[in-house]
Amino acid sequence: MNNLLTRYALPGLVTGLLLTSSLPAWAQQTRQEYLLTTDWKFAKGEQPDAAKPDFKDAKWQTVSVPHDWAIYGPFSPQNDLQTVKIEQNNEKEAKTKAGRTGGLPFIGTGWYRRQLQVPGFGAGKRAVLLFDGAMSDAHVFVNGREMGAWPYGYNSFAVDITEALQPGGNNVLAVRLQNLPEASRWYPGAGLYRNVHLIVTNDVHIPVWGTYLTTPTITADYAKVKLRTTVETPGQAYQPLRLDTEIRDAQGQVVATLSTPLTATDGQEFEQNLVVPKPQVWSPETPVLYAASSKLYAGDQLKDTYETRFGIRSFRFEAGKGFVLNGQPRKFKGVCNHHDLGPLGAAINVAALRRQLVLLKDLGCDAIRTSHNMPAPELVQLCDEMGFLLMVESFDEWKTPKVKNGYSRLFDQWAEKDLVNMVHRDRNHPSVIMWSIGNEVPDQGMPDGGKLARRLQDIVHREDPTRPVTLGMDKFDDALKNNFAAVLDVAGFNYKPHRYPEAQAKLPQGLILGSETASTVSSRGVYKFPVVKAKDKQYPDNQSSSYDLEASNWSQTPDEEFAAQDDLPYTLGEFVWTGFDYLGEPWPYDESWPSHSSYFGILDLAGLPKDRFYLYRARWNATAPTLHLLPHWTWPGREGQTTPVFCYTSYPSAELFVNGQSQGRQTKGPSDQPQTRYRLMWPEVKYQPGSIKVVAYDAQGKAVAEQEVRTAGKPHHIKLVADRTSLTADGQDLAYITARVEDAQGNLCPEATTQLQFSVGGAGRFRAVANGDPTNLQPFHEPRMKAFQGMLVAVVQATDQAGQVQFKASGKGLQGATLRLQATPSPTR
Ligand code: GAL
């Protein structure tokens, strides 16, 4: 939703009535938007008659939305057992898998109910509910009448409830949701996991996603802005309408205005062309935003106001040049992410998303693929504001199933509607530079796969001719043979760096995208010996080694993709699988419970960087140097044994010292071994307690930086580090507090597993905790958890009261720690 003019939380019962002589401010407004966050009632399981207004829900749980009913667990392999053969993973026979979708209880039916009093609603008004996403198969009832339904849980959809709403009275909203077994390949979440908006307008109004803004010409002197605004009028009758639009720059200065009458021949759409002088262009490095504010008049009566945020930027995909943004070629430094937020589950939270983006910025990442579905609108808005390029993806399946009850059931009836909503919602966002119509759809291999791709791509082009369409292909030979790959605007390949030259030679586009790359697995801070490159490697403890040499059988290590990207000028860059670990898909342990979350992330489920973070950072972060050593250096019992040391660095070379003794200098550089090209490695180091230290040299051979890792002593105290010290007292905001178990000298105890307890006092509450261990079955929402490799992250949420928040952590045998945060008043309260 672009319109942020009025946005309030609407309490369940509003007691003020409209009978006063001077109308309250909200009643005079042309449009009100409310977030329906509080006072929801929820019950799991089938609930006969729950749609009826007089149904008694007093015994149901009171929840606030966004809400994920399954994230509270408990984890169990019985929650989502599947006996399947995963063809994409090259499996030859069906096997029983636990935790494939997270081992959490998301399957089944759930109901939400809520009282609705709608201030400002009455004759001549319209009311619409906008669901940012509801998991899944939503049926929406108002006062017992079903007003709309949307099966795909990731899409946004609007339901006009005008006809069912009682003006001035009590109304009851009820939503039924149902998740089928074997409907997903990862944890989907469950329930009203994204925001629900209530929008009240006049009957002459601009509908949901009612503007389409493009910038057809951009020069240093001016940018043309073309704004198409749809208007809905009651009975479609012609009225003398006028639209006044002003464009404001990032400082709020008006830079262009236009007043346009709607003539009878315009139908229901205004077209306005405005000129912004000396535009400031949007890019990941300069995420400058403008806003077009439109006022809709019927005669001289103001009927509606609507705001469209946008950015001014040009881009093209050009054979021989690649992706060119504002005239500058660049390669995507991208990650794929699933939608869950680790310990918060799928329940959307802006602070949690922002933290992810802050971490990705530090990584040097500039692009995100919303695998494999439509993202929360808040993510798209944040990418506009913070500067990320987005590939917005739609589907993981078309007609041919990957899982028994997946999207293939809906495809024929819903694919077009789903694509239209996806494009309409997000097409004004400067961050969005590509649409993806699918991921590894098995239809690639079907005789009419190419036709299907063309049909879906045409739908997207019809709704937005300004952005190219791509798809992540895995069936290389099929996709090339049956014209599937040739149809797409941008040919995206998953895990095929060794075949890019062949694709380039055979395909017409002249460009190749690494749409999904480098499914390397690792557990943060876990190192396995001997250090060898391996595929699908398993260990008895269900962990993977952080030396970053273990990948899935269909994938490569990061360095192999780096080499292809560096050596082949026609490559567009990559989207690594994945930025963050996610719930579900615990490969290579999806048959050996208790693994329930992935090992693919550059950061773990708690958002803590794994070693791999620094391998990518060294390559991607152009503004700050990287120098990182691994493994940790606390190995009692390994004395004298070979313990390889790796250094991930942006510097060209470095010298390693063990207890002051040089182990020689290594230099990155051309090599037919991708690893030695991108990492500095000392494979023969023998472990002795003490320290390892690298000294890094710049291109001129000058020693410029060093890093040291010391052997840790006994666990001694807890150290707390918060990602922020000040919170907004809006009931939503979050601080992420990393707890480290340290020895007396402040070294991380890298194998510590002490259970830590937390308490939160003052203007905050404990929200969740995660330690990044995919095998840990402790619930995320209880204020205790074992440290994993010496660390974990607790999440504290602001209340709606300003004041100090005290966070305390304790653990047996450790000196505890306290941290204070400040919650400051929320500007919207
Ligand atoms: C890909 C797939 C992703 C994920 C990944 C794991 O084939 O597109 O969704 O399953 O493999 O490596």
Image: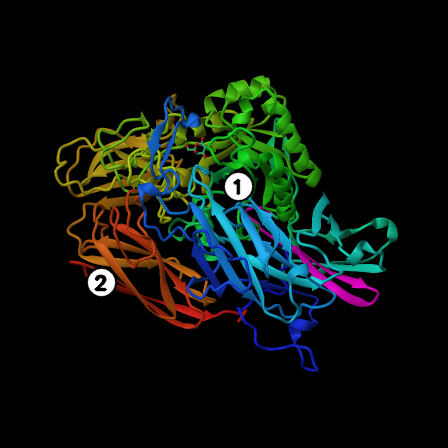
- Residue type for callout 2: Gly
| Quadrant of the rendering where the N terminus is positioned | bottom right
The residue lying furthest to the front in this view is 48
* Spot occupied by residue 472 in the image (x, y as percentages of width and height): 53, 31
C-alpha span from label 1 to label 2:
42 Å
> Residue 812: image x %, image y %?
17, 58
Task: Determine the image quadrant of residue 120.
Answer: bottom right
Q: Which residue carries the number 1 mark? A: 373
Q: Which residues are magenta?
A: 283-308
- 377 and 431: which is toward the camera: 377
Position of 268 compared to 610: left or right?
A: right
* Residue 810 to residue 552: above or below: below
Above or below: residue 699 compared with residue 791: above
Closer to viewer: mark 1 or mark 2: 1
639 vs 783: above or below? above
- Would you say residue 260 sits in the magenta stretch? no
Q: Which residue is mark 2?
A: 816
Give the left or right position of residue 407, taking residue 634 as reference: right
Q: Residue at x 67, y 72 (%)?
A: 27
The overriding secondary structure of the stretch rendered in magenta is strand
- Residue 385 position (above or below residue 90): below
**Mark 2: secondary structure:** loop
Badge 2 density bin: few <14, some 14–19, many ≥20, Cα 10 Å = some
Outermost residue, bottom side: 21
**In the image, is 252 to the left or to the right of 115?**
right
- Residue 675, position in %: x, y? 36, 28
Residue 287 magenta-highlighted:
yes
Question: Can the viewer see residue 462 in this picture?
Answer: yes
**In the image, is 188 to the left or to the right of 249?**
left
